[in-house]
Amino acid sequence: MFLYEGLWVLVSGLARFIGLLSAKVGAQLLVRDQALTLLPSWARLRSRYPRCVLFVCSSAGEYEQAKPLIKRWSARGDTALFILFFSPSGIKFATSQKESVPFALVASDKPSYWREVAAQLRPDACIFVRYELWPGMVGTLSQFSPLYLIDGVEAPHLRRKRLARRLRAALIKPMKNIFVVNDNDKIFYENVLGYAPNLIQTTGDTKYDRVLERISERSEALERLQTSLRDFLKNRRVIVIGSAWPRDLQEFMSCYQDLKAFDPSIAVIVAPHDLSESNVSTMQKMLEGLRVRRVSQSGYEGASSIDDILLVDVLGDLPELYGCAHLAWVGGAMHYRVHNVLEPACRGLYVCFGPQYQTSQEAKALVQRELARVIHNGLEFFQWYKNLVWTTTPPHQAMWQAVVEQKGASDRIIHEITRAWTSQ
């Protein structure tokens, strides 16, 4: 660890030099430095509780997976909770959701930083969501607290890459328990990564709990959104292209005129995954010549039946936008990997996405059960759409049921962790 600390000192020095030349890099370093200033106040908060749990999340997606556990521990009232993010987008998302649990960016992976975190918070459990593991973090925290990996899934690329596989195996070795999504994932952690089989438990995926709980948590938000969009939604069949990238929009627009001719009642909501101005502007240009309204923080109230397409650059509203829809095209899988398919699935929508979906266990499960459609281009989407049956609301009751039957992972994980506390 001494050499690793030295490496991070060199990396940090180089980053600070670059920060002097780049305002963007400098701003990012400043935000990470602020994580250090928060530790004393976090320590004071921690002292009020008999227990403490630290969550380490990569970004917004992992935060959503941790959220059901955070909610349950908050309800217990005996545990101080803290969240550390590796990505600034996680901070942005948690802020948009008005998260009450303290959160900050990881300052660095220097072992000395993690020793300070452990000394200040004295965690009873450190929980890592799915895959974000670093040597300084794991090696140092394991000396002070039990470590747990939740929602573990197979990583197919590790079967092919020997060096990456060995590194991953070393990083999971200090874990007290690994909670995996299904039995195939358990076999992967045991046979490929060499983790002790008696320490692997199949508990399911907390994603399912989160999407179902959000429906009830955000019911009023959905009602407000539906009211704001009343004129836009009335008597129309709504397609949401969620977590969209330009590649998704390109394929959809290749068949849009045929769709509109076949079904004049359709209305489209495009919610980009990347909300940077450059990306949203690029997608807006792709929609030129159509009746498009761009919706930002100013609200949805201006949308009406005159508009055929809404381009939404509001962070955090996508699950409720799915609640206004009949069909979802989930983005990302045309060029890289599919984004969250459970948010539309739990609404009972017809769901489709591109061919790059193998990294998503839930997407694979829906395809295997013939509940979601894989599309390769706009023409395939159009042919599929023409054969859909619109007789129920939501249109796809089996899709909803497929989500409901997978709930419960969060309760199982908390039971196992807290059982270890009571046996101490």
Image: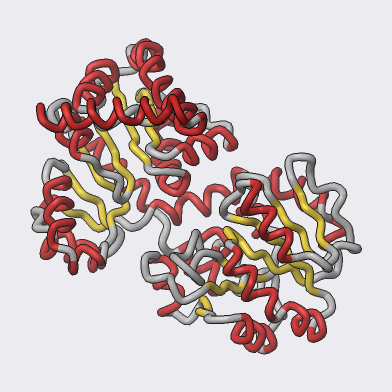
Write down the quadrant of residue 140 in the picture.
Answer: top left
User: How many numbered marks have been drawn onto this rendered protein structure?
Assistant: 0
414 or 332, which lies in front? 332
Q: Is residue 121 above or below residue 216?
A: above
Task: Find the residue positioned furthest to the front.
Answer: 21
Point 70% across, 44% down: residue = 221
For the C terminus, which image quadrant? top left
> Residue 151: percent from the left, percent from the top?
32, 53
123 or 393, which lies in front? 123
Q: Is residue 22 above or below residue 268?
A: above
> Residue 230: percent from the left, percent from the top?
85, 56
Is residue 382 rendered to the left or right of residue 267?
Answer: left
Point 54% across, 71% down: residue = 399
422 or 28, which lies in front? 28
Write down the quadrant of residue 238 in the picture.
Answer: bottom right
Task: Find the residue positioned furthest to the right.
Answer: 306
Point 62% across, 53% down: residue = 279
Write down the quadrant of residue 363 in the picture.
Answer: bottom left
> Residue 163: percent from the left, percent from the top?
13, 57
> Residue 360: percent from the left, percent from the top?
39, 65
Residue 420 seen in the current view: no
Q: How is the image coloured?
A: secondary structure
For the N terminus, which image quadrant? top left
Q: Is residue 95 above or below residue 382?
A: above
Is residue 260 rendered to the left or right of residue 108?
Answer: right
Point 56% across, 66% down: residue = 330
Residue 342 seen in the current view: yes
